[in-house]
Amino acid sequence: MRITKRTNIAIRLLMFCAANSQRLVTKAEIAKCCNISENHLAQVVNQLSQLGYLHTQRGRNGGLGLARGPDAIVIGDVFRDLEGGLPLAECFADADNTCPLVSACRLRLALSDAAQAFYAHLDGVTLDALVCENPDLMRLLRPPVCAG
């Protein structure tokens, strides 16, 4: 299974916000610290705010932050929300499926089972678990390192 760039950016963005939860953060500092294009980041910020993971505040003192506590953000949910609409393989895509084996192929079931196991494992991981008591990550995501 391959994770899309959008989901990769989303997880980095959420970890950055969790590591800096005492303040609103800006897209510019996230982009610089996490090595993300501001254009890609803006799209992900918009999607995560629509999904209820982030809150944004406009204006001079604006920025963004987590819309709920990091212990309430389940990584499996984030992955499902961002990756869930994408077919795992061609045979999962109703409209674009050209595979002649689909009616007898057992790989589709095996892939479906594997995807369910993947999401089930991520359902046991919260954003808090990724960030809390992770001093190496905190050093990377805190302002003095990122602002330089």
Image (tube, rainbow, N blue to C red):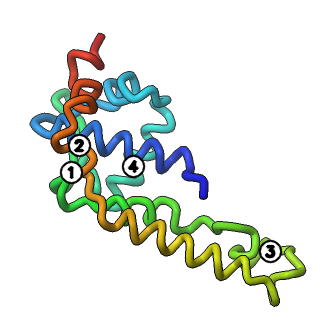
Of the residues shown, which amino acid type is indicated by label 1? Asp
Alpha carbon of mark 1 to alpha carbon of mark 3: how far? 39 Å
Q: Residues within 10 Å of mark 3 (few under 14, many from 20)?
A: few
Q: Residue at x 49, y 75 (%)?
A: 116
Is residue 109 in view from this perspective?
Answer: yes
Residue at image point 71% right, 74% down: 93
Q: Of label 4 and label 3, which has the lower sequence position?
A: 4
- Marks 1 and 2 sit apart, C-alpha to C-alpha, by 5 Å
**Callout 3, which amino acid?**
Asn
Q: Are marks 1 and 4 in contact (CB under 8 Å)?
A: no
Q: Nearer the viewer, mark 1 or mark 3?
A: 1
- In the image shown, does 42 or 93 lie closer to the viewer? 93
SS state under label 2: helix
Q: According to the image, label 4 marks what residue? A: 46
**Which residue is disc 3 drawn over?**
97
Residue farthest to the left?
A: 22
Quadrant for the N terminus in the image: bottom right
Residue at the spot x=79%, y=83% of the render? 105
Q: Which residue is labeled 1 in the image?
A: 128
